[in-house]
Image: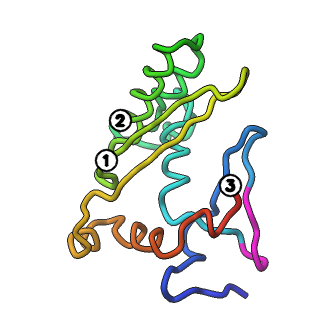
Amino acid sequence: MTQNNPNTDAFDGDTLVIIGANGADYEVKGGDPVRDQGFINHLNIALLTEPGWCGNELEPIASRKISSKFIVETDKPINRQQLLDMEKAAIADIKGDEFGDQRVVVTIPITGQTNVAVFVQPPTSELQALLLTKIGKSWVNQALNPIPERARP
């Protein structure tokens, strides 16, 4: 039985997919998968969808087909300029009406590992205006019940 939190709809949305160094995983709490309310899965899809993804065959509108510039940049030799190029490509991939300011930081903490941190802000700081946007409820839910509290990092 799903227990809904009336303040945050914690069980609404798609199953939260957590991408880590060893692949993808998801968390189950109380018999229900932890849900993503619109941010993490959106960013993962935007940043990690290979060009030529077969699902694009189902989308008739060319501008809505998914293909990551970031993932293409990750296949190139790493140097200081390449880290900057990866950051620029990631910003290009996540541009959209659902986000205001965006910042991406790509680092190499140890040999053989690349960390990508994505920071996004709501499209507006005005609560009433935010609630009128398509994704406004998700921003409010995220503020009330942040993903780190719902799932392990």
Vertical side of 4 occupied by 147: above or below: above
Q: CA distance from mark 3 to mark 1?
A: 23 Å
Q: Residue at x 75, y 41 (%)?
A: 23
Which numbered mark, 2 or 3, is in the foreground of this view? 3
Which residues are the magenta region?
26-32
Instruction: Please give the residue where the numbered disc 3 appears in the rendered image.
Output: 153
Residue kind at label 3, given as amino acid type: Pro
Instruction: Please give the residue where the numbered disc 2 appears in the rendered image.
Output: 62
Q: Is residue 44 covered in magenta?
A: no
Q: Which element carries disc 3, helix, strand or loop?
A: loop
Callouts 3 and 1 close, C-beta under 8 Å? no
Quarter placement of the N terminus? bottom right
Q: CA distance from mark 2 to mark 3?
A: 34 Å
Q: Position of residue 35 (x, y in %)?
A: 61, 67
Q: Nearer the viewer, residue 134 or 109?
A: 109
Question: How dense is the environment of label 3, judged by Cα within 10 Å: few (below 14), some, or many (20 and up)?
Answer: few
Q: CA distance from mark 1 to mark 2?
A: 26 Å
Residue kind at label 1, given as amino acid type: Asp
Instruction: Please give the residue where the numbered disc 1 appears in the rendered image.
Output: 101
Q: Position of residue 64 (x, y in %)?
A: 37, 42
Which numbered mark, 1 or 2, is in the foreground of this view? 1
Residue kind at label 2, given as amino acid type: Ala
Q: Earlier in the sequence, mark 3 or mark 1?
A: 1
Q: Residue at x 61, y 63 (%)?
A: 148
127 to the left or right of 142: left
Residue 33's disc is: none
Vertical side of 146 occupied by 1: above or below: below
Q: Residue at x 44, y 29 (%)?
A: 87
